[in-house]
Structure formats: structure tokens, C-alpha cells
Image (spheres, coloured by chain):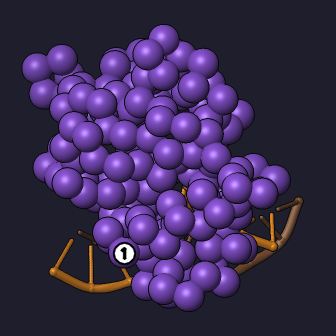
Chain colours: A purple, B orange, C brown
Amino acid sequence: MHYWLMKSEPDEVSIDDLMAAPGQTLPWFGVRNYQARNFMRDALQVGDGVLFYHSSCATPGVAGLAEVASTPYPDRTQFERDGKYFDPKATLEQPRWVSVDVRGVRKTPLLSLARMRAMPGLEHMAVLQKGSRLSITPVTAEEWRLITERLQAGEAH
DNA sequence: GCCAACGTTGGC
DNA sequence: GCCAACGTTGGC
């Protein structure tokens, strides 16, 4: 069992979109970075916990909890010739990029990036490191505990 | 294999 | 829109 933080631009796929999807499940697609791809291909397991993070928006932060709902499979957007995720070097025989399905567990009050930076115990969290741009990063069990406890405290108000 | 140029990410 | 940080490309 591992934990991950996965970024999504809410203009593309928000936590509301995820919770409204059939089975609260959507494919997580569009990753075009090898390090992120390798996490998905080699380390993600069905049932892993996911912090669903909104990026490139007014207030970035964790917007909900989710879980990995499939093993990796070829990201179909790499073959969509007119799409923004098209990769001319990918072939059906040798796909480069993978997707996984993500199932939303619940929407939470937004835990902003600024608040996360202020939380003791998250100093070493991958997504908070300077220059961190990966769309998927590992979360330690302790970081997961701190964040989910904070989210529950937020919901109690 | 080096590295300059260029492209992308993403917070602010 | 700015810009720091990082990744990729391609000439040599």
C-alpha cells in the first residue's frame, strides 16, 4: 500500500467531475513526463491512496481523496492525432504513455498549498519541494496521516 | 556526451 | 503575465 499526490487542473478534471462520474471513476491521462510515467507504470497499485490536488488554479491544493482503481494501461490520448496530448512517436504496438483509473472517495474542504507549507511534518513532502513539477509524487504514510487528519478536522467545523 | 536553445509547468 | 525550475531536443 502506497500513497500518492496526483495533480489535476480543475478546468480539465476537477474533484466535482470525478465525484460525478459513473462509479466516481475517471481515467487519469495526459502524463508526458517519464519520471511520472514510471511511477504509474512501476509503482502504483490498485487501492493505493490518492490526494487529489487541484493545480494551475486560483487556490491550488488538495481538494479530495481518491484511490487508484486500475492497473496501468496505454493512455489513449497519445494516439489522438488532433488532441493536445498526441505523441507522434507513440505507436499502438509500442505505446509510451500510460493512464490509470482513479476513483474518487470524497471531496474535502480545500487544503491549500499555502496551508500545507505551514504544516509541521510536511517539510520534506515531495510536492512542496522547490522546483517540484511532477504531476504525480509519492506521499509517505506519515504525510498521509497528517493530511487526512487535517482534512477531517476541517470537515468537523 | 556536452550544452545552448527552447518548451513546459505551475505558483504567484 | 512573469519567471524559476526543470525537461527535451539537436547540433557538434
- The picture places residue A12, in percent across and down from the top left corner, at 63, 31
Q: Which quadrant of the structure image shows residue A113?
A: bottom right
Residue A85 percent coordinates (x, y): 46, 30
Q: Is residue A103 above or below residue A145?
A: above
Q: Quadrant of residue A125?
A: bottom left
Instruction: Let me know if residue A60 appears in the view.
Output: no
Query: Nearest the camera: A89 or A36?
Result: A36
Give SS at disc 1.
Answer: helix
Image location (x, y in percent) of residue B2? 27, 85
Q: Which residue is mark 1?
A: A142
Q: Nearer the viewer, residue A85 or B2?
A: A85
Quadrant including the C terminus of chain A: bottom right
Residue drawn where x is 48% and y is 33% of the image: A104
Q: Residue at x 62, y 25 (%)?
A: A17
Residue at the (43%, 22%) spot, across then down: A25
Whether residue A3 is visible to the viewer of this picture, yes or no, is: yes
Q: How many other residues sit within 10 Å of disc 1, few (<14), some (14-19) or many (≥20)?
A: few
